[in-house]
Image (spheres, rainbow, N blue to C red):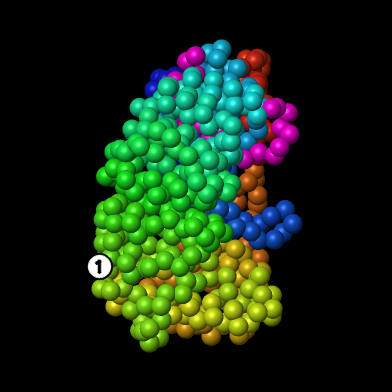
Amino acid sequence: MASPLPDELWLEIFDYAVGDIDLFDHTLPTAFSEASWFKTLYGDWSLRTAQESVNNAQRRSYATKKAIMSTCRTWRRLGYEFFYRFLFFSNPRNIQRACYLLDRDKELGWWVKRLHVTRYFAGGGTTMETTQNSLVSIIRQCPNLEIFVVNWPLSNTLQAIGDALCTYCPRTLRVLHINIPTTSLAKLIFMLQCLPKLSTAHIEFDGTPPEQITLGSAGDLALTLPSLEHLSLRGPFQDFLEEAIGWEIPALKTLCLDFVNHRDDFPDLIEFLRVHGAELTFLDLNIIPTLDVPTILDLCPMLTTFTFNPDWRIPSWEQNLFPGSSSTRRPHANITTIGLHHLLYAFGVGYAATYDKVDPFATQMIRRRNDVNFGALNKRNFPRLERIRVLNTTLLTDLEANNGPSQHCFERWERWWRQCQKEGIRLEDCTGETLGTLPMDDEDETEDEGSTVEEGQSAPAHLSSLRELLMECRRMNAQREMDVTPPALRMIYAGTSRLS
């Protein structure tokens, strides 16, 4: 297909068409990343998390890039840059295919900025050792890698993958998302020491931590992480947090802690915040054990966003009369957004409705704590408070299935709404809509490869025009003799078409 436009202009057009610019942000989804409703194949409403939306965005981008590169020889030549800007794998066999292509053509790895391996089903036709070797080989070919995300546990592969990252892209890597065993803390510390440009780190710890962890020489390291702004920890992270108290993290702005279902052996968060909390602007605490919220808020005066568990029993809060309870020793001057985790018992839906019949006393105690804690979220304690967001996706799903709160909990729903209206505070759910805005069955939606397109909703004008241009070029090209797809692209196309 003849092209009267210069390559630079085509590249600019392709950049708009693939729509993947957000995938290269040096951040990761947080508790405040919005979920979205979609209809399953069975016709039920379900919530898609922010991470699932990112995965779907990568699949859609791949489909657009394949359409561009299948149009003509010129577009195929120019499209390589966009096709290899990120690599997304949900099938281990595709890792081997990509490894073969990058080993054969060294220039392809130069374009890769993002490498994402999501969880996949076991028995993918390859062994863990083969997958590890292929992944290490890919990293070796990507000197400009900025984002590395692996959602499956790196049990026996952390050493090899960590060495590859520290050897081939220590100055370019900005985002690290990994899942490691709790016993691999020493390897992680050595790995972080070699990544001075890291700005975002999400670390999931898997397994039961040993009673006495052996760090060896790693325990004597006083790490300096000059660029780390976003730190997210999930699982039994107590040993990591205790070690991090003595580190230098001058740029830390965001701290997210998810202790999952663990209740014991929680680390000394107060001491960590004494050292690193003065400049925090975002603090997310998804934790079951009760924490000293007034002290935490005093140690973090610059916070603008704060999340906690309103199921906590905080004696200093309960000593004040409801609803004007004082949650802080002094009003917090900067917090504008507060997020609420858990709250499963507040509205009598889902699992809580069943548990209420088994142990009504325990359920009522939790609901009372919810009322006391929610009553403290007012303009007296937080003068700049603008919104409160209920973050639990399970709770919102249960509310949708029950068509709202149960009858005996509806009074709590209305009371919380009146409190927020009186204070001029927006009450939201995890989708960013006002709490109580549930999906309607009369809205037609069409699922196409994991994406949701609502009736009456159109794509942006520039994207629609680009898609029409692509379709017209495909029709024109179909009238000519079809180009023979190179083996390299044929292998990649086969892999991406099976992504799920």
For residue 263, above or below residue 357: above
Residue at the spot 38% in from the left edge and 57% down from the top edge: 269
- Residue placed at 70% from the left, 61% from the top? 44
x, y percent for residue 258: 49, 55
Q: Does the magenta stretch include residue 111?
A: yes
Question: Badge 1: how crowded within 10 Å, few (<14), some, or many (20+)?
Answer: some
Question: Looking at the rendering, which quadrant does residue 477 occupy?
Answer: top right
Name the amino acid type tagged 1: Ala
Q: In this view, does 417 lie to the left or right of 361?
A: left
Q: Is residue 443 visible?
A: yes
In-front residue for pair 386/60: 386
Which residue is situated farthest in the top direction here?
Answer: 104
Give the position of the N terminus as an image quadrant.
top right
Q: Please name the residue shown 59% across and 79% down the image.
A: 362
Residue found farthest to the front: 212
**Residue at image coords 50%, 46%:** 212
Q: Pointer 1: what residue? A: 333
Q: Does the magenta stretch include residue 459?
A: no
Percent x, y of residue 197: 34, 33
Location of residue 226 by image quarter:
top left
Nearer-the-camera pick, 330 or 477: 330
Which percent across, then down, holds residue 126? 70, 27
The stretch in magenta equals 106-127
Q: Is residue 50 visible?
A: no
Left or right? Give the position of 74 relative to 256.
Answer: right
Closer-to-camera residue (32/351): 351
